[in-house]
Amino acid sequence: MAASVTTRFAPSPTGHLHLGNARIAIINCLLARRHQGRWLLRVDDTDPARSREEFLTAICEDLRWLDLSWDECIRQSRRTDLYAQAFAELEARGRVYPCYETPEELAQLRRQQQERGLPPRYDRRARALSDQMHRELARSGRRPYWRFLLEDREVAFRDLVFGERRVPPGALGDPVVRREDGGFTYLFASVVDDVALGITHVVRGEDHLTNTAAQIQIFEALGAAPPRFAHLPLLLDAEGRPLAKRHGGLTLRELRARGLEPRAVVAWLVRLGTGRSAGPEDDWERLCADLDLARYGRQPARVDLAELERLSARVLHRLSFAEVRPRLVELGLADADPAFWALVRGNLSTLAEARGWWQVVRGVIEPVVVDPDLLREAAARVPDRIADPEEARRWLRSLQKATGRRGRELYRPLRLALTGREHGPELHLLLPELGAERIRARLEGRRA
RNA sequence: GUCCCCAUCGUCUAGUGGUCAGGACACCAGCCUUUCAAGCUGGAAACGCGGGUUCGAUUCCCGCUGGGGACACCA
């Protein structure tokens, strides 16, 4: 019954998901899971002009990348019968009315109102049309578009993020619910679906906040109790510009291409705006357990990609070999083993960097020689085998004695020769993985 | 243009008519360490501006500025 929670994520397939969309999706999913409820993917493809199948495919792919799985996928384009039925109900109750203005006329009306310092709002002029005129318009082939007749009363509701909201009568114009082409608008279809699907919590972006009062009236006109609403402030980029106005850079696809860990993206997005920071230990259960809509602030939060990238690296460092194995295979590292992963993971910022280390550990690299004398000495002393870190330590200590070098003086040249890099795993852990042959060759400055 | 929301360290935020204005992430330093990372310890860092109200405002009110959202036969 009403004990359960049902939420939905309602993207329109008109573009790729960006961080802001993803945040809404995740929070909806988390809220449902937290209450053992249902999370639905509702595809808002009521606008045939802008919706594209390939975007839907991409959206699903992106959600799966984040490891979000929906209980059901609903496509609004296949539910027009349902909307028509609800529309007929409203028509029977006199809550919708036909209008005939052209887009140009409406634009002109808005312009005139603005010039007079008035808010642009539909003036219900079509309500004044006589039956006679309706007949004439119909005969001339004009098809109407339809508006929902708002009641002149205050609408009050409590938003889970924005708090008590009161929308005075007259603050809103009658919303369009059906287009001239017969299609239903988002505003209307959304309500009908929320009723039909038993949505209990509508969590969406702040851009929908002003729709809410009108939608509440539609819920009520349909004889349904409105769900709970939570509107989250939109996200801004590092420069403080709205994400939606960006050309790119912050879509999920781009972040994935950049090598970010999906688990980091999820945790970071959920915590953003709450004052609590995300850590690598924040798995799904943890995020679920302390989700609290009331903790989100009302001001738009900024996206700091550098922060996300840091978190991503820390998440990566904790992944087990079993978890990354399939991805290593995808990277062409089918032979990678647990020892390799344990050795290098702490030095990665993205998984793709493992390839470079694979070259270092099991492949061929060009040594960097900065201290030939030292390296020659070291090469001459490489034992036949270095089986484990303990033996490696012993050898390094012996080198210390033999060369009189210690600390950085000793280790930096060795590291550069052996790995070609300034930084990396600790040498005593690395040496056994390299093997004596490779070590000797690289210390001698040979490509190996 | 009209309406709504917001304004505290770099960032996300907590908070109060009298507080050492707290935390987290980032940052800086020290320790540790063969490097990086991690870890530990310490440090620097904020109440947008102008008026009120008040014995006293970061807190309450007004204005300004700034930011966000809405005002589509888009969603």
Image (spheres, rainbow, N blue to C red):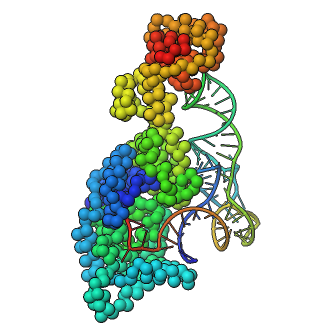
Residue A69 against residue A12 in the figure, above or below: above
Horizontal relation, residue A294 to residue A145: left or right? right
At 49% from the left and 21% from the top, the residue drawn is A365
Q: Nearer the viewer, residue A266 or A62?
A: A62
At 29% from the left and 91% from the top, the residue drawn is A136
| Percent x, y of residue A364 | 46, 20
Can see residue A363?
A: yes
Horizontal relation, residue A86 to residue B55: left or right? left
Q: Quadrant of residue A329?
A: top left
At 38% from the left and 25% from the top, the residue drawn is A336
Q: Nearer the viewer, residue A437 or A94?
A: A437
Numbered label tally: 0
At 56% from the left and 84% from the top, the residue drawn is A116
| Percent x, y of residue A141 | 28, 84
Q: Quadrant of residue A182?
A: bottom left
| Percent x, y of residue A135 | 28, 90
Horizontal relation, residue A92 to residue B58: left or right? left
Can see residue A296?
A: no
Q: Nearer the viewer, residue A167 or A370?
A: A370
Residue A131 against residue A391 in the figure, above or below: below
| Percent x, y of residue A368 | 57, 20
Q: Quadrant of residue A321?
A: top left
Residue B59 against residue B45 in the figure, above or below: below
Residue A186 against residue A320 in the figure, above or below: below
> In the rendered view of the protein, which quadrant contains the N terminus of chain A?
bottom left
